Image (cartoon, rainbow, N blue to C red):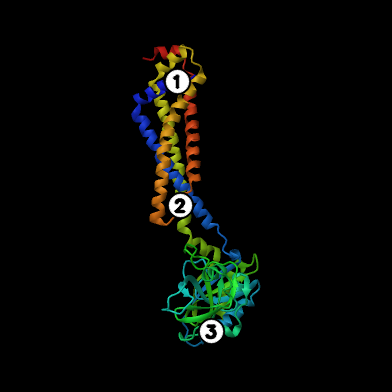
Amino acid sequence: MLEIKPIINALRRSKVGAILLLIQIAITTAIVSNAAFIIQDRMTYLQQETGYPEQDIFSITVMTYGKDRDLSKQFEEDEALLRNLPGVVDAALSNAVPLSGSGSASGMGLKPAPEPGRNVRAGYLFADDHMLNTLGVKLKEGRNFAPDEVIVTQDPGKVPNVAIVSSTFVQEAYPEGDGLGKLMYMGDKPFKIIGIVDKMKGPWLKDDRPDNVVIFPYIKAETYQHIIVRTEPGQRAAVMQTVEDKLLAAYDKRVFTNVITLDENKRQYNASDTLMLRMLMVLIVVLVAITALGIFGLTLFNISKRTRQIGTRRALGARKSDIIRYFLVENTLICSGGLIIGCTAAVLMGQQLLQRFSLPALELQYVAGTAIMVLAMTLVAVIFPARRAARISPSVATRSI
């Protein structure tokens, strides 16, 4: 039977190395627990459904400098041209591109400002009656805009009086249900909800309400405009190669500053999150590797210091398995102390991240999983040097003074 007392005494004699390893295990447990949780949270965020056929959609940013054309008519001609191109499903003008990180948001109230009442924040889009089909989203209730409801103007005094909203928006505005046909206000301007779409995202995926979207049938005829295009599956690249030439042939006094796919727009918007994921993964690998090497090195160091002791045990009848078990138990004791401290530190660190960076609360299953992983790594890291110690013969140990 293995006695714990000799192991405790041995740890006391080499307490500096044991304490350093304990601290290393604690730090690794605390950081890896939170890093693994953040990685999972960010991966869930990056893989979320947007409601759009991203692989079939691209956008064009147009800057018109010519003064000899009526912009309202030119936009209508551009849309008609794009819709007639081979491989194009539909096209729509918009003030912003979903998932791009650039757009507008406002509070939508049940009562006109400044009257008090429920107010729901939402990203909003100005677009025409082709927007839903272009984005590939489906109406859950109600209807689409009628062509005569779309306001194309340079007059800021003209505002739309109808809107299509996302289902999450209407659920927040009318939790009791039945928001279709209800009147809401953007500031003091009223609008009626005529349609509800099942699922769609606004310009910002990182927004606290990314699913709250309101679409108004309004196109402000400005020199700077976005055109969103949806193509047949597999046709997007071919359409993108010809679209600039086609539009310039129709009117050449303008430039195209950005022809970009929707999924690339999303990738650029999420670039910082992707970089953070990679850095956290590297951090986990480095911490685990350093901890494993620390355990390996400390065990080898202890073996070199205890060669005579190991030889004596072997001479007194200790089997190789007893020597291996000795070092496994010794490192398990160190690891257990480090895990207790590390798990406590992980929870405290998670609370600080929650308060300072608005991250979700750390789930204890990540702390438990990390603790199991660190313990398993500790046992694996000590096996090789422990087996090496078990091969020390009594005669060699006796000569080692």
Do the numbered discs 1 and 3 sit on residues whose CB atoms are within 8 Å? no
Q: Amino acid at mark 1?
A: Glu
Q: Is residue 370 visible?
A: yes
Task: Tell me the CA gap for discs 1 and 2.
Answer: 42 Å
Q: Quadrant of residue 311?
A: top left
Of mark 2 and mark 3, the one earlier in the sequence is 3
Give neighbour class at mark 2: few <14, some 14-19, many 20+ (Cα, 10 Å): some
Q: Residue furthest front?
A: 176
Q: Is residue 252 visible?
A: no
- For residue 280, above or below residue 342: below
Residue 291 point in image, percent of width and height: 43, 36
Q: Quadrant of residue 90?
A: bottom right
391 on left or right of 54 = left
Mark 3 highlights which residue?
151
- For residue 106, above or below residue 393: below
Mark 2 highlights which residue?
361
Mark 1 highlights which residue?
3
Give neighbour class at mark 1: few <14, some 14-19, many 20+ (Cα, 10 Å): few
